[in-house]
Amino acid sequence: MAVGCVRVALAVLLQLSVWIPVALQCSISESQTGQVIRLLNIMVQSENSSAASGSTPNPSILLALRLASHHDSDTERRMLARLQVDAVKRVQEGLPFSSGTVALYCLAMQASCADPSLTPAPGLKGGKKALDLRKLLEKKLKEEIDNIDYKNIPLTNYYQVSLDILALCMMGKAVTSHSVQSLIEASDNGGFSYGEKYSVDTASVAVLALTCVKRSIKAPNRMVLCLKILNALKCLIKNILQETTSDGLIGNLYSTGLAMQALSVTSTNYDCSRTIQTLLERAGSGSFENPMAASQITPSLENRNYLELNKLDCKDFEKTLDGSALPLVPPTAPEGVITVHYRVEDGIHYSFNDSIEVTVPVGSSLLQVMEEAAKISPAKFRFTVEQSSWGPFVTSIQVLAGNTEERTYWQFLTGSNALDQGVGDYKPYDGEYIVAKFSTY
Ligand code: B12
């Protein structure tokens, strides 16, 4: 007879007298929906310009649009088609397709009522008509786990391993106990930290993944795994809650959305009114204009989470998003100039440490400061970037490049505090000291 994990869970919870489930009421009020619609508009507009310029679609945006209560069905349908074409292209042409990206594609397709294992692929080798993305994801996850087994770190990171397990579980695929245990071990042994910083983002996606697996366990022979999951969830939630700040954020501004999803699926007793208030204030002052940031916050503002994506109504496209009613405020032309102190420093081998003062127009991004520095003194300040879903990621300064295997990267700080935005979004203030430090994580 099949025994539900939940029943065992209840017994364990009673025995350990751990947290008591309390429904989490965390959504915005009716009068605040305008703010969410504005963020949805930012995503729709970024999708429109990405489609027009032929750049790669962003699955995280489609996921957020599908989970929202207002829809732009044309955009959603077009995004799904673009994701399907792009997945086939990446496979056919052997282009980069990290495990977490495949997972996000699968989640976005699932949320759009399309089966990832039957992705239309007209020109596929061997006369096949469909690409099986689920199978590909299983293979990608196996590669991650093999790497953990041999080298003690995943090929990418534990955020992506969590996404992989979450996506496979949401597709109804039984994830191997070994994969789940690898994730649990990492969560116990500091695998979710970058440098000294605990990654609330990673812990939150791990909570979603483990909760999905826990809910799917039916067979009695997986009870040991079930208990391990329950224990891991308890620790993860405790760690996440420890990162709460006085203004209600969890981790930082950009991990709070995922953390709220994690807290909501585990029914943790957490009052989120302060959190919502801060998020809305910061959204109002322009902190979520990056479409990727918008995509990770909107589900939580409406109290939705990634575990609900299989329940979405495929025909429910009537409530159309009225973009024209909410015009984006045109940016006011900045006036004047600011001076920024910029230093680049090899914090690992101490091979260089160079500083400069740069004058740029008010409202310039850190990227513009770096470009100006590189113009003045290319030998010391030249740099390269790679485009990612969050914008430009700095890969090298001078000739020193970050490396995934060595776990090195260029970290950006204001004074001694790490920036919570990338160089494309962060706007330095007059007189600010910005440091780019070559570091390990
Ligand atoms: C892992 C990770 C890293 C790793 C990436 C390398 C690795 N081994 O994977 C490291 C430690 C290097 C890193 C660095 C930084 N990160 Co980071 N990172 C993440 C994390 C936890 C997961 C990313 C991921 O794998 N996504 C899944 C895959 C499928 O998507 P992807 O787009 O292909 O992922 C790639 C990019 O996201 C890129 N990347 C990672 N971080 C950042 C940050 C920026 C600004 C950009 C443009 C790209 C980028 O690396 C990923 C792997 O290749 C996210 C959390 C989140 N909520 O997304 C934060 C996150 C994206 N990072 C963030 C930040 C702020 C940074 C830094 C700017 C921190 C700093 N002060 O220096 C630097 C980037 C500096 C630079 N050189 O340009 C913020 C971005 C917020 C924002 N509004 O922009 C996030 C959301 C964390 C947070 N809550 O603050 N990061």
Image (spheres, helix red, strand yellow):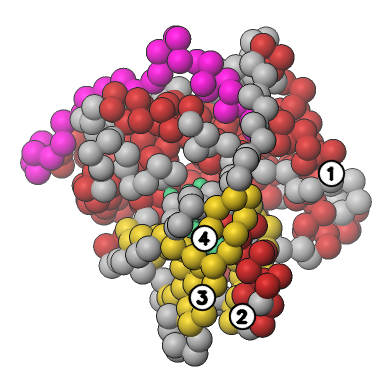
Q: Position of residue 140 (x, y in %)?
A: 60, 62
Q: CA distance from mark 3 to mark 4?
A: 11 Å
Left/right placement of residue 130 relative to residue 31 reads right
Q: Residues within 10 Å of mark 4 (few under 14, many from 20)?
A: many
- Report the residue at 45% width, 9% height from top: 31
**Amino acid type, callout 3:** Ser
Q: CA distance from mark 2 to mark 1?
A: 33 Å
- Report the residue at 37% width, 46% height from top: 252
Q: CA distance from mark 3 to mark 1?
A: 37 Å
Q: Would you place residue 412 above or below residue 230 in this image? A: below
Q: Nearer the viewer, residue 366 or 92?
A: 366
Q: Which residue is mark 4?
A: 340
Q: Earlier in the sequence, mark 2 or mark 4?
A: 4
Left/right placement of residue 117 relative to residue 420 reads right
Asked if ligand 1 lies within 8 A of label 3, the reply is no
Q: Earlier in the sequence, mark 1 or mark 4?
A: 1
Region rendered in magenta:
14-43
Image quadrant occupied by the C terminus = bottom left
Image quadrant occupied by the N terminus = top left
Indicate which disc residue 126 carries.
Answer: none
Q: Position of residue 314 (x, y in %)?
A: 65, 20
Q: Which residue is mark 1?
A: 53
**Amino acid type, callout 2:** Lys
Q: Earlier in the sequence, mark 3 or mark 4?
A: 4
Q: Look at the numbered discs 3 and 1 and tell me whether their residues touch, using CB distance below 8 Å.
A: no
Indicate which disc residue 380 carries.
Answer: 2
Q: Is residue 156 visible?
A: no
Q: CA distance from mark 2 to mark 4?
A: 16 Å
Q: Which residue is mark 3?
A: 355
